[in-house]
């Protein structure tokens, strides 16, 4: 196999009139550039092709050629007779007997490589050979090979239904042959396979297993009073619905339950029930588990019960936004049980169906149409979307297409122009789908009739009897400053590395934009190569209010490049606290509750203010040795004074505030000293110590808690701070007429 093609693979030009056909079709020969939504889709297609030709296939090799952490990026499928048999030594050192093998070094293969077009991961064929060095089988022989002798989940469910109806095995096979439209004896499984499946059903009493699940939940509740569960039994004493959530899940939801995903696309085979999983994302960008539910039926009543039960678990706190599959019953249930929650559909579930819906219909225009769809999906303006959608339908002749009609009717549930005003914590990204799917697969892998509840806890990282401690210690990330701006330095001391990375991406791009002032609070920000258009930014410095028409902050909680450009060009060197959400801050987040040591918003606000003052102190003190000496002396004096006050009484359940600055101050922040020194060197005023500031306030009788007046002098270099503290305001010439205040 290794000699059949190089590691990179070959990519050939495809004629423009090549038609991308339905991937489940058996009438197509694989071709270079053919696309699949997943590895499994590629495997099924090649398996169907192999069956038609008279051979079977197997998965041969995977490779993550882009490095560790990127996942599998390449997969090879080979003929089942590829390679050569290897004789392995047994445990006692004796050689195993040489059984006859069908492998003969066949070179037939198909290679797929993972690509990402328009932020949507796809698998493409980069290598293919159908040259065999052995005789191919006939159609009635090939179906008995292992790759073709398979039984789908639908087949198993149907056989189970037939068995409950009292049908014999032969009757089942005949009926399924008629349903599938295949010839007698041409099903992908045999009578023996059906009998083995029925025997496994007899060995598993699903009703008793469901009762055991209830016992597991009761046992868990007895051990941990904060564990929550609920269930319903039907008229036949069968478990119809059950939901549960762990204590750590409830704590995570309190902090990060503003945006959730409710995935109901999987079925738990062990219990023959639909599994719904509640997932969110924490301030470090990691998936967190909120709870799960098992449902016997897929209807509105079941989904309504699931939603209502989960709200009971979390004391009625509904999420701001929820992402689900495009399910009509679930859509209605959310509208009833969570009327104030914005409901949206997971875009990756929709995109996964495009190849089946449109590849044959559009043919060679499929790629262009897909690019146009993603352009419309990512637009900012609803008006632009409406106009663009109409033009797209006209261009590709999609009038009356049922899928296009349905997508347009539900556009407010999936198109970003309709969702940008709502907070989704970045979970609408198609790249996020891989992470979420891997997280769900970990949970599904725990399905077992033996202690399933505990195995789910282990799968999501909740160790048994973990108590208030975090499941896994987080890796300390080293942060590197890229722009050297005070805004970047400030954000680095407040946000988690994940959130800071998102903000830093916007900061890096901000200088590419021009900020045009329309009036004192209204700006147009557009890319430097654009002559018109742009985003509208409203900024009221006095109220520390700023908003952009792109709505990135409302959508993700991260300020956009347009806002950052306006702030930087108007000498504002710190981001207002309200635009550094606690949700993305590095404040004891491993314990899920922000500012858990305080019980009031006032105290939490003071902690945020102190954090901002500390970051300002660091930035100002790094300019010269004199400033550093003064800062260190004053901070040491303040700390000694604070320690004289009695501390709070702690017990085992208290959680203290943890400063994030340990990983961000001088040693961990790169490339910042030079910028601050050059900035300080250009200053026109002498440094003022904290002691002098305090003395002046006491001398002048200034109430530090009164409403502050804001300084607006550009020459000050600190736009937006308290005017009474500004060294440039000391002159009577400036203060006489109130100049410089807003």
Image (cartoon, rainbow, N blue to C red):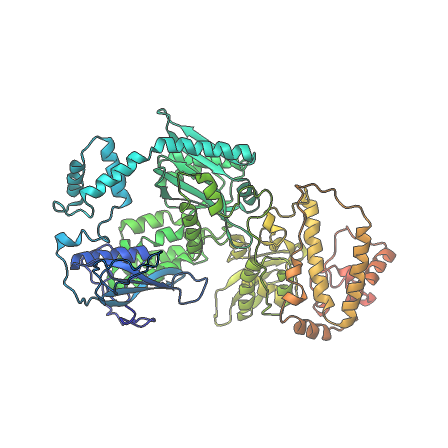
Q: Image point 51% across, 62% down: which residue?
A: 535
Query: Between residues 474 and 22, which one lies in front from this camera angle?
Result: 474
Q: How many discs mark residues in the rendered view?
A: 0
Q: Image point 46% across, 39% down: which residue?
A: 453
Farthest residue in the right direction? 699
Vertical arrangement, residue 224 with respect to residue 413, above or below: above
What x and y, as percent, mark residue 17? 22, 67
Which quarter of the figure is the N terminus placed in?
Answer: bottom left
Q: Quadrant of residue 376?
A: bottom left
Farthest residue in the top direction? 235
Taking the image as shown, residue 269 lies to the left or right of residue 652, namely left
Query: Between residues 384 and 378, which one lies in front from this camera angle?
Result: 378
Taking the image as shown, residue 214 lies to the left or right of residue 138, namely right
What x and y, as percent, mark residue 665? 67, 63
The answer to whether any part of residue 361 appears in the image is no
The answer to whether any part of residue 198 appears in the image is yes
What x and y, as percent, mark residue 194? 22, 41
Taking the image as shown, residue 560 lies to the left or right of residue 392, namely right
Query: Between residues 141 and 343, which one lies in front from this camera angle?
Result: 141
Q: Quadrant of residue 494?
A: bottom right
What x and y, as percent, mark residue 341? 49, 42
Which quarter of the figure is the C terminus placed in?
Answer: bottom right
Taking the image as shown, residue 118 lies to the left or right of residue 165, namely right
Vertical arrangement, residue 164 with respect to residue 121, above or below: above
Q: Quadrant of residue 44?
A: bottom left
């Amino acid at each position: 196999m290794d000699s059949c093609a190089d590691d990179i693979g070959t990519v050939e030009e495809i004629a423009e009139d090549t038609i991308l056909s339905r991937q489940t079709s058996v009438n197509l020969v694989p071709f270079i550039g053919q696309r699949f939504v997943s590895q499994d889709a590629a495997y099924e297609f090649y398996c169907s092709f192999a069956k038609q030709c008279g051979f079977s296939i197997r998965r041969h090799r995977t490779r993550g050629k882009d490095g560790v952490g990127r996942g599998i990026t390449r997969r090879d499928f080979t003929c089942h007779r590829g390679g050569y048999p290897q004789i392995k030594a047994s445990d006692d050192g004796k050689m195993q007997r040489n059984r006859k093998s069908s492998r003969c070094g066949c070179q037939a293969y198909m290679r797929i490589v993972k690509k990402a077009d328009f932020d949507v991961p796809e698998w493409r064929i980069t290598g293919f050979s159908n040259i065999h060095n052995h005789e191919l089988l006939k159609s009635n022989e090939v179906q008995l090979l292992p790759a073709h002798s398979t039984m789908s989940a639908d087949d198993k469910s149907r056989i189970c239904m037939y068995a409950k109806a009292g049908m014999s095995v032969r009757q089942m096979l005949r009926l399924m042959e008629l349903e599938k439209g295949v010839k007698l004896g041409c099903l992908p499984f045999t009578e023996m396979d059906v009998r083995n499946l029925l025997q496994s059903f007899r060995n598993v009493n699903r009703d008793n297993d469901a009762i055991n699940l209830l016992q597991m939940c009761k046992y868990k509740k007895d051990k941990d009073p904060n564990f929550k569960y609920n269930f319903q039994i039907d008229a036949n004493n069968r478990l119809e619905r059950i939901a549960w959530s762990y204590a750590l899940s409830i704590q995570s939801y309190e902090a990060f339950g503003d945006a959730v995903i409710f995935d109901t696309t999987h079925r738990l085979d062990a219990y023959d029930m639909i599994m719904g999983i509640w997932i969110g994302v924490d301030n470090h960008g990691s998936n967190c588990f909120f709870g799960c539910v098992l449902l016997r039926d897929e209807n509105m009543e079941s989904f309504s019960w699931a939603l209502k039960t989960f709200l009971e678990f979390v004391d009625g706190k509904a999420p701001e936004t929820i992402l689900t599959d495009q399910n009509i019953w679930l859509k209605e249930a959310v509208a009833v049980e969570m009327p104030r929650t914005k409901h949206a559909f997971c875009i990756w579930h929709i995109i996964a169906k495009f190849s089946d819906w449109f590849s044959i219909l559009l043919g060679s225009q499929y790629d262009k149409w897909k690019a146009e769809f993603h352009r419309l999906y990512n637009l900012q303006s609803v008006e632009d979307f409406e106009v663009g959608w109409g033009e797209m339908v006209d261009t590709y002749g999609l009038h009356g297409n049922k899928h296009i009609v349905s997508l347009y009717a539900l556009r407010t549930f999936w198109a970003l122009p309709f969702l940008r005003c709502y907070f989704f914590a970045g979970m609408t990204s198609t790249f996020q789908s891989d992470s979420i799917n891997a997280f769900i697969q970990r949970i599904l892998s725990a399905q077992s009739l033996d202690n399933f509840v505990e195995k789910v806890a282990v799968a999501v990282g909740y160790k048994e009897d973990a108590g208030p401690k975090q499941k896994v210690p987080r890796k300390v990330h080293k942060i590197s400053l890229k722009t050297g701006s005070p805004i970047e330095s400030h954000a680095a001391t407040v946000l988690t590395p994940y959130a800071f990375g998102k903000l830093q991406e916007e900061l890096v791009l901000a200088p590419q934009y021009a900020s045009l002032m329309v009036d004192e609070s209204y700006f147009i920000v557009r890319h430097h190569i654009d002559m018109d258009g742009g985003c509208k930014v409203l900024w009221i410095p006095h109220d520390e209010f700023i908003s952009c028409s792109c709505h990135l902050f409302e959508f993700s909680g991260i300020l956009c490049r347009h806002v950052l450009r306006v702030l930087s060009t108007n000498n504002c060197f710190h981001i207002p606290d309200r635009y550094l959400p606690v949700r993305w801050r590095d404040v004891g987040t491993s314990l899920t509750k922000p500012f858990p040591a305080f019980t009031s918003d006032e105290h939490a606000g003071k902690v945020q203010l102190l954090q901002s003052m500390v970051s300002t102190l660091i930035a100002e003190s790094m300019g010269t040795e004199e400033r550093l000496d003064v800062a260190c002396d004053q901070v040491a004096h303040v700390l000694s004074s604070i320690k004289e006050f009695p501390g709070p009484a702690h017990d085992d359940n208290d959680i203290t505030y943890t400063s994030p600055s340990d990983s961000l101050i001088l040693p961990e922040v790169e490339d910042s000293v030079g910028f601050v020194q050059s900035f300080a060197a250009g200053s026109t005023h002498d440094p003022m110590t904290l002691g002098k500031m305090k003395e002046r306030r006491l001398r002048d009788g200034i109430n530090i808690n009164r409403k502050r007046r804001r300084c607006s002098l550009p020459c000050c270099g600190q736009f937006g701070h308290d005017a009474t503290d500004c060294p440039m305001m000391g002159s009577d010439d400036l203060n006489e007429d109130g100049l410089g205040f807003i």
